[in-house]
Image (cartoon, helix red, strand yellow):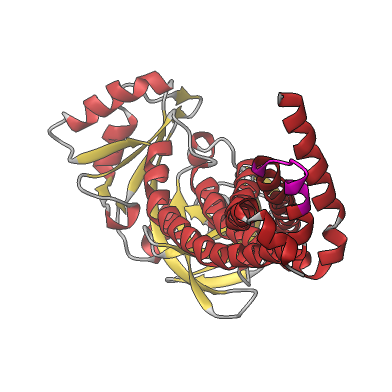
Amino acid sequence: MASNWLSQVAAVTSVNLRTIPERRGSSLATVIGVAGVVIVSIAVFSIAEGVRHALTASAGSDNAVVLRSGSDSEMMSGLQRDATRIIAEAPGVRRGAGGAVSSAELYVIVDLPKRSSGTDANVPLRGVQPAAFEVRDKVRVVEGRKFEPGRNEIMVGRAAASQFKGLDVGNHLRWGENEWTVVGIFEAGGGLPESEIWCDVGVLQPAYRRGSSFQSVYAKLESPAAFQAFKDALTTDPRLDVKVVREDEYYAAQSQTLTGLIRIIGIFITIVMGAGAVFAALNTMYAAVSARTREIATLRALGFRAGPVVISVLAESLLLALLGGVIGAAVAWLAFDGYQTSTLNWSTFSQLSFAFAVTPPLIALGIVCSLLMGLIGGMFPAIRAARLPVATALREL
């Protein structure tokens, strides 16, 4: 009984698939429609994934960020020199050959033209202390050298150098009251520092008349487990009024607003375009059923059940959708994966450089969406084929 049913499914499905070339125009429309939806949806979601990676890639659970209490970002924070010294001496901070692995930092915004459009954009200029290179241990100089403390020198993140003009090694720029020389380019595993420009904080403060003020302290802890003792020591110290968070949690929170907005846009676009692809699949499968009305009726009259007919129509729809999904995923990966661009980071009102990230889960999601479109597009034509009265179908041309 079961083998007979399966043989009917195989026979009817085989006939359906072999006749696809006869309907290549409508079939191609379905494949292209589904592929278009998959390309756009993967491209949009890869933006969110790229932003998330840029903000969190170089952040570590054994790093802590200290801000003024009540601050959600460095732009709203402010710390005095005495406070930064107390933070550096707190229990749990790793000690190296040069003392505490802690960097008190200042964050300002400078204007630079984009390479692509020439329009000015806000780019972060970060003043750091020498220990910053130990705190962010993924930072590696790939061209030139590090800046020398006490000199008007800057080093540039690789992503920023690729997105903005004037950041080539050897160039001179004027910001604040200083003229700066680009002496190096660095990478940080694709993380946020690659969107920034670094210099000596002691040089940056007078250039922008910031006195002895800082905005944050980044500290490398002895281990991730040392975070709670470090936090408790600072938040209970009456001399301080600070907020202490893990670096990875701090940047994950910053990424949520931007990536959430991008994902909402992606879902909306996918639904709207997906509806169009579903209608294309409906037209294709209704046309297929209409063209094979007498054939289907003949099979039913010979004893073929409704189930194999339904499955055969769905199989054709799913195959076309799967083909579109695979093509769309391949095109999205080839066209967008690694594509470098920048957008506004709403937490700091500065440009965040990032690369589109077409990940395996996004490709899988695109293919699953294509199959869903094929299933919906083939369901109603399949039901119509199964319910068509045999006598009526046989009289149709």
Q: Is residue 356 visible?
A: no
Picture quarter with the N terminus: top right
Q: Which residues are magenta?
A: 298-306
Residue 3 on image: x %, y %: 76, 25
The quarter of the picture where residue 218 lies is top left
Q: How many marks?
A: 0
Q: Residue reaching furthest bottom?
A: 118
Residue 386 on image: x %, y %: 63, 50
Whether residue 88 sits left or right of residue 158 in the image: it is: left
Asked if residue 147 is positioned above or below residue 163 in the image, the reply reads above
Residue 270 on image: x %, y %: 53, 61
The quarter of the picture where residue 334 lies is bottom right
156 drawn magenta: no
Image point (74%, 48%), residue name: 301
Q: Is residue 212 visible?
A: yes
Image point (12%, 33%), residue name: 238
Picture quarter with the C terminus: bottom right
